[in-house]
Image: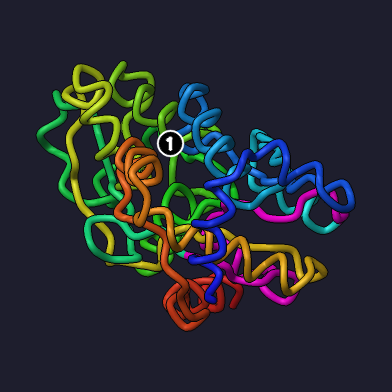
Amino acid sequence: MNRRGFLGMALAAPAGKLLADGPEPRVLRFGLTPVFLDHREALLRRWRHFLEQRLLRPVRLIQRGSYAEIMELLRLGDLDVAWLCSYPYVIEEERLRLLVTPVYDGRPLYRSYLIVPDSDQDTHTITDLQGRFFAYSDPDSLSGYHLPRHAIFATGADPDGYFARTIMSWTHRNAIKAVAERLVDGAAVDGYVWDMLKQHEPAVVARTRIVSRSRYHGFPPIVARDAFPEEDARHCREVLDSMSDHDEGRGILAALGLDGFDPTSPELYDSVRRIADEMAI
């Protein structure tokens, strides 16, 4: 019998009894950053319950304010898995194991949007924002930090001195709101987050304008620390991969704005590796 068949049989029995049989199950520590879920506590509780029922073990969702904090917890062994940005994944991949990649709009890919206030109709490229006030999201974010800096680097300019002022918003949602409220002249944000906020907070997004979109890159993956047991990693991968097979799983995915989670190859992130290599020169 395959694992999905076993899980289907297991879920027909009371979860409490299953968890009581045998040794006490270890808690799965799942790290998250406030990329989009920082204000969606009910959805997080729903997802945690779904994972507990199918992994047959307690799940603890651990949120931190930056990718650096999540990576430090992974290094220390204080997290088992985490939803991480593509950039820190490729920088730290020797310490990590790729589990699944979210599928968005039919593909395991996403891109960065360069945005300005809707009142700004004169900005056409990032070069028009030189010497102005710009918002980054996180120093380890591909879409919210490294892609705009790479675009500046490609013009031959120095990204460090390009803008008159910069701030770190720490979430894409905060960066979008800062642009909408004209607190900054522009920002680079995760296109997935902008698209989701357009559905959930349309009045905010309507006050921003997309200037340009980057090329596609591998969507921020869910990873495991390198010392996480292989059997546990395989189980997590299969449960996440099978979310679209269950009504509740499909409901959670719809709330996340995702089609599902697919096992992918590390080669999906080759374009991110090239950017990291070019910026390191």
Spot occupied by residue 195 in the image (x, y as percentages of width and height): 25, 40
Q: Up-down: is 249 above or below 196?
A: below
| Number of marks present in the image shown | 1
- Residue at image point 79% right, 51% down: 72
* Stretch of the chain drawn in magenta: 76-100
Q: Is residue 81 magenta?
A: yes
- Residue at image point 49% right, 66% down: 5
- Residue at image point 23% right, 62% down: 106
Looking at the figure, which quarter contains the N terminus?
A: bottom right
How is the model colour-coded?
rainbow
Q: Up-down: is 3 above or below 165?
A: below
121 or 22, which is in the foreground? 22
Q: Up-down: is 218 above or below 192?
A: below
Spot occupied by residue 210 in the image (x, y as percentages of width and height): 19, 41
User: Residue 155 appears in which quarter of the rendering?
Assistant: bottom left
Looking at the figure, which quarter contains the C terminus?
A: bottom right
Q: Which residue is mark 1?
A: 172
Spot occupied by residue 173 in the image (x, y as percentages of width and height): 41, 30
Q: Is residue 206 magenta?
A: no
24 or 258, which is in the foreground? 24
User: Residue 119 appears in which quarter of the rendering?
Assistant: top left
Q: Up-down: is 100 above or below 51?
A: below
Q: Is residue 68 left or right of residue 214?
A: right
- Residue at image point 63% right, 65% down: 235
